[in-house]
Amino acid sequence: MSQIQLKEISKVYADGYEAVKKVSMDIADGEFMILVGPSGCGKSTLLRMIVGLEDITSGDLMIDGKRVNELAPRERNLSMVFQNYALYPHLSVYENIAFPLRLNKGGISDEEVKKRVGDAAEMLELNDHLERKPANLSGGQRQRVAMGRAIVRDADAFLFDEPLSNLDAKLRGQMRTEIARMQRRLGVTTVYVTHDQTEAMTLGDRVTVLKKGVVQQIASPRELYEQPVNLFVAGFIGSPPMNFLPARVEDRSLRLPFCEVPFGEEFADKVKGKDLVIVGLRPEFVKDAEIQDPVPGAVEFEADVDVTEWLGNELYAYIPFESDEAVRAKLDELDRDLDGEGMRTQMVVNLEARSRVREGERARFFFDPKLMHVFDPENGDNLTRNEEEAKRIAAESEEDRKRALERAKRKEAEAPA
């Protein structure tokens, strides 16, 4: 295991393009760190700089306190699992897993190779496939072989570059749990690149959100979801994504397309001098007033429903509204940053499956205004972020990580030899 530190790491290509811009982060020993962001944000480039496949233009990369910028990949003792598996088609599963050990030129005995491959195969349930060739395996099995090859090296850290992107949705879900289980059992520091925010939210102890080579926020999944620092993070994290609504500031209230939200003196200073803000409201925070009683202080409103989607366990309702031209440019820019295909001026609400809201009809809704976020339309900053709450979530998440590692170690120690 190892601690990895990035100190103002940058990558500038020969043509002058700056792919990564002064990224700094501390990855703790045994931590599972996710690098996430839309296409072209620099996450894979950053991973390749850590493993040594890309030169570092400026900044320092430290592994266990040692600067490794100039070390070759093989000297960094890191294992990388690639998107395309990178298996040798002419070798059996056994020999593919054993391959990094064979490179040691006799430094590892055949008995030790057999033991390491056997342990990895048992962990990844590959014992029945050791004599098969990669061409005869499913996508999920090939990915497990690639993971097995990383495990046997006894590396200081695992690096994953979008390892599940070639799998179908069902297999991705299964492999997520395999990777999480493996990482906890081994307790190995792991850096994992993905563009899938579901993977980021379910796998990572902490998540680094990148935009155009710049770190936007490094935090636990829960903190990203509940206390995003800006519009970009709020829009990237969550499925369906957060709704962004224009709101006019009028005296002690915010006028949204569907309703008016009063606010107190403590919020007045945050919007002082602003005529317009952007309100962020997650789809699941809007409730159907016909089947649930509004909570104290709730804001109630009526709206015409354009389209509904019933998914068995939940119901999505789409509510169109007129966008304010003053924030249209900002929302269009956000949509492009998030790889969108054009922002629709509609609010998505995620209701209980028993809701009887129907398309083409007017319905009654409510939401708790304490759950909404308010963003500055000029710089995208979250005006309602609660720093004390963010610190509390961060402390709880770190405690949860340490407890999970301790449980995994106890379980491993108690397992029969």
Image (spheres, rainbow, N blue to C red):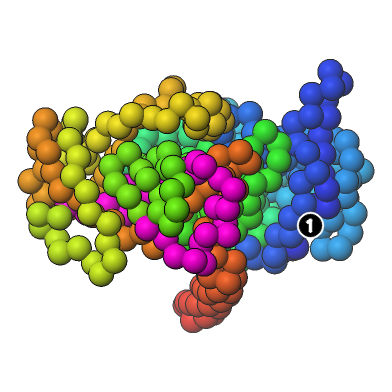
**x and y percent of residue 273 in the render?**
59, 48
How many numbered marks are there? 1
Q: Residue furthest top?
A: 15
Residue displayed at 15% across by 64% down = 293
Q: Which residue is mark 1?
A: 5
Picture quadrant of residue 310 = top left
**Closer to the camera in the image, 394 or 84:** 394
**Residue 239, relative to residue 218: is it above or below?**
above
Position of the N terminus by quadrant: bottom right
**Residue 218 vs residue 160, the one in the foreground:** 218
Q: Nearer the viewer, residue 73 or 105?
A: 73
Q: Residue at 53% of width from left, 47% of height from top?
A: 375
Task: Verify whether residue 94 appears in magenta.
Answer: no
**For this view, does 98 lie left or right of residue 204?**
right
Q: Residue at 55% of width from left, 52% of height from top?
A: 271
Q: Position of residue 159 (x, y in %)?
A: 65, 47
- Any part of residue 59 in sight: yes
Secondary structure under tag 1 reads strand
Residue 264 falls inside the magenta stretch: yes
What residue is shown at x 18% (from left), y 31% (from top)? 307
Residue positioned most to the front: 251
In this picture, residue 160 sits left or right of residue 267:
right
Q: Amino acid at mark 1?
A: Gln
Image check: 168 left or right of 59? Answer: left
* Extent of the magenta region: 262-288
| Residue 360 x %, y % | 11, 30
Residue 110 seen in render: no
Instruction: Tell whether 388 sits left or right of 302.
Output: right
